[in-house]
Image: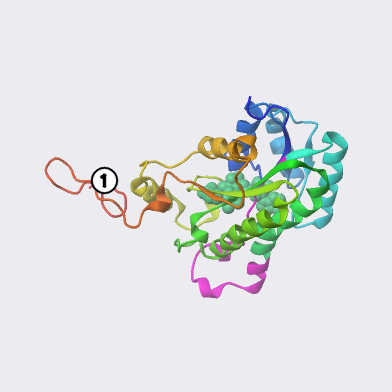
Amino acid sequence: MIMRGKKGVILGIANKKSIAYGIAKACQEQGAEVAITFLNERFERKLAPVAEELECADRFYPCDVSRPEEIKALKESIERDMGQIDFIVHSIAFAPKEGLSGRFYDISKEAFDIAMDISVYSLIEIVRELKPILSDNSSVLTLTYYGGVKYIPNYNLMGIAKATLEMTTKYLAEDLGRDGIRVNAISAGPIKTLAAAGIGEFSFMLKWNSAHSPLKRNVTIKDVGNSGMYLLSDLSAGVTGEIHYVDGGFNIMGMPAVEINEDGKQVIAWNGEPK
Ligand code: NAP
């Protein structure tokens, strides 16, 4: 039981397909005591059975990160019900639809500000507000994507947010290392979730990644959950400020590999369709 004795809060479960659910499940199975959050009343009703399953129905709190008062209230609730905690998972992102397809240069300032506020600034604010109840051997984890490092079609505004999130991870790691707080990010390969459904041509991304990654498959929330659990556990005690890829190795590829059949013919087309 790698996480026995560890307590933490996980933000960003929308349903059982969420990456945050995969992380929560892995932590709970390894003995952690978790708290989870919901965005609003609608999600409270939807997520109640998930809270039961994760044995945290009494540690199930509202938190819309665009409302600073809800982050403050979250800290009070956790302190009251759990005392100190050892980990935080920030698995939250949002960009208005206009930022996830079409011409990049058309993005409005309003959409830009919303994406940055919810997808990036919230990490800083959550860590700052919850710092007084973080143990002196604690770990913070956020979720990013390769579109913050290289151009990915339609990822547009979220790419800018993820680039900023990755540097935020590194600056927080340096700043909080002296307090015994580690801060890391997982860069996950594409997974079909609610948030992903908002990205233009997402099913093509899935095809492309499975065809061109070394493992020749897409990753699952279990893959990300287990790696996330490692980064939250003492197994990664010497690791901070890292962007850890859980993407089947896709990020190492400089050019798609070509598969050749026995007749010397190319069998995987450039777009991942069988030839
Ligand atoms: P998801 O299940 O839709 O989770 C996104 C979560 O963000 C939802 O729980 C959503 O809550 C929450 N959220 C949005 N606005 C919020 C706000 N104002 N306050 C609090 N929570 C808010 O999708 P996911 O794919 O698991 O996404 C989790 C993280 O992984 C995101 O950072 C995403 O960018 C990242 N990621 C995803 C992929 C992928 O392919 N799926 C790949 C790499 C990285 P509601 O649903 O209740 O609005």
* Image quadrant containing the N terminus: top right
Assign a secondary structure to mark 1.
loop
Q: Residues within 10 Å of mark 1 (few under 14, many from 20)?
A: few
Instruction: Indicate the position of residue 37 as horizontal and vertical percent values.
Output: 74, 42
Q: Residue at x 42, y 48 (%)?
A: 206
Examine the structure image and report whether residue 106 is included in the region drawn in magenta. Answer: yes
Q: Is residue 195 visible?
A: no
Residue 82: quarter of image? top right
Examine the structure image and report whether residue 198 is included in the region drawn in magenta. Answer: no
Stretch in magenta: 87-113
Q: How is the image coloured?
A: rainbow
**Label 1 beta carbon less than 8 Å to ligand 1:** no
> Is 21 or 136 nearer to us in this picture?
136
Instruction: Indicate the position of residue 13 as horizontal and vertical percent values.
Output: 65, 42
Farthest residue, direction left: 263
Q: Residue at x 61, y 43 (%)?
A: 238
How many marks can you see?
1
Instruction: Indicate the position of residue 71 as horizontal and vertical percent values.
Output: 80, 51
Q: Residue at x 85, y 35 (%)?
A: 81
Farthest residue, direction top: 1
List the residue tagged with mark 1: 274
Relative to 112, residue 162 above or below: above
> Is 15 or 3 nearer to us in this picture?
3
Disc 1 residue type? Answer: Pro
> Is 14 or 182 nearer to us in this picture?
182
Relative to 250, residue 99 above or below: below
Instruction: Indicate the position of residue 35 as horizontal and vertical percent values.
Output: 74, 36
Residue 216: quarter of image? top left
Q: Residue at x 75, y 31 (%)?
A: 56
